[in-house]
Amino acid sequence: MAPTQQQAKQARAKVLSTGKQPKASIQRYLKSTEAQLVEKEAKSVLLLRGIRCSDAMTTVLRDMRSMNAPNAKLLNKNNQIVPFDDEGQLSLEFLTTKNDCSLFAIASSNKKRPNNLVMGRTFDHQVLDMVELGILRYKSMNDYAGMPKKRVGSKPMMLFVGDAWHLDTECKKLQNLLLDFYRGDPVEKLVLSGLDHAMVFTAVADAPPLQQPGLDNATTLLIHQRTYYCKLKKNTTGGSGSAPLPYLTPSGPDMDFRVRIICIMCYLLIVLGTVIISLLSCHLFYYFGFMFLHGVPHQQLCVLNFHSFVVSFHPFIYVHVYP
């Protein structure tokens, strides 16, 4: 179990106060739990249930555990966690540190956010980025009864179809998160027989069902995830050195989802943004004061000043919020 931030601070304070170095075994363990720029092992995934989690979302978590096995851990109890709040962020950092996991996913379902799935990752025991997905359709692995499934620990072949994956900045971040979530163990060489399943993510622009005048009818991004079992057979048409032919059969899990929120955490940008906004606020104050003297309502100025205060001090930088 990795030490929490408070335990690590207490250990450092004890070393500084007494001047006594910890044992060699403790030093090796603390060094193994430090953050690394390049991970040499597979990242572990922590799967959580939210405040209210339906049976369908529980099935989603179980299938995600099967896809990431043996580097996945599922907690069965409900957690009073709201991921995009400060307290929820601290709870996620504590649980991921306690269970030694750098990736997490929390599923919930309520009236405002039905079939909600939040995926994210941490770095140095702090939340790095998160994405909120709304699942529209899901077909679990149990629905493909009798079909062959992937082997435990096998690496997937991942294919991203659509122009949005390399044109849209938010889609690039989602693609990077999905690759980090399902990549498995990093290896230098692959055995051809070890490639037994493929995951296809197709991004399409989905128009709203009803075009209403006067409202925002912008298209939203719809992503289709399909999983196939890959069976290699001998190529009878080629020569002796020809590659085998892959045959794909649906194996699940399959889902259709929309991206609701993509946010990234960056403390350096927060500090710089706070300084810049603070400097701009001095100029805006005189500008708004001049406007107030010329008849601009005071309530409007208060709303603008309050909005700049919230943007400068909120711990998250919201990259994009989808309708």
Image: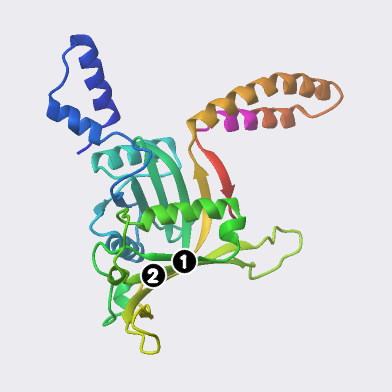
- Give the quarter of the figure containing the N terminus: top left
Task: Give the image quarter of residue 60.
Answer: bottom left
Residue 308, position in %: x, y?
Answer: 64, 30
Residue shown at 31% from the left, 56% from the top: 184
Which residue in the protein does label 1 denote? 159
Q: Nearer the viewer, residue 113 or 15?
A: 15
Residue shown at 13% from the left, 30% from the top: 25
Residue 87 located left or right of residue 79: right
Q: Please tell me how crowded label 2 is: few (under 14), some (14-19), or many (20+) other residues with Cα within 10 Å.
A: many
Q: Write the start and end of the magenta stretch as one range.
A: 306-314
**For the view shown, which residue lies furthest in the front direction?**
240
| Magenta residue check for 20 | no
Task: Give the image quarter of residue 26.
Answer: top left
Task: Give the image quarter of residue 88.
Answer: top left
Residue 138, position in %: x, y?
Answer: 41, 70
Residue 40 sits above or below residue 179 on the image: above
Q: For the residue marked with disc 1, what is the amino acid?
A: Leu
| Magenta residue check for 310 | yes
Which residue in the protein does label 2 denote? 198
Q: Please tell me how crowded label 1 is: few (under 14), some (14-19), or many (20+) other residues with Cα within 10 Å.
A: few
Residue 277 sits above or below residue 67 on the image: above
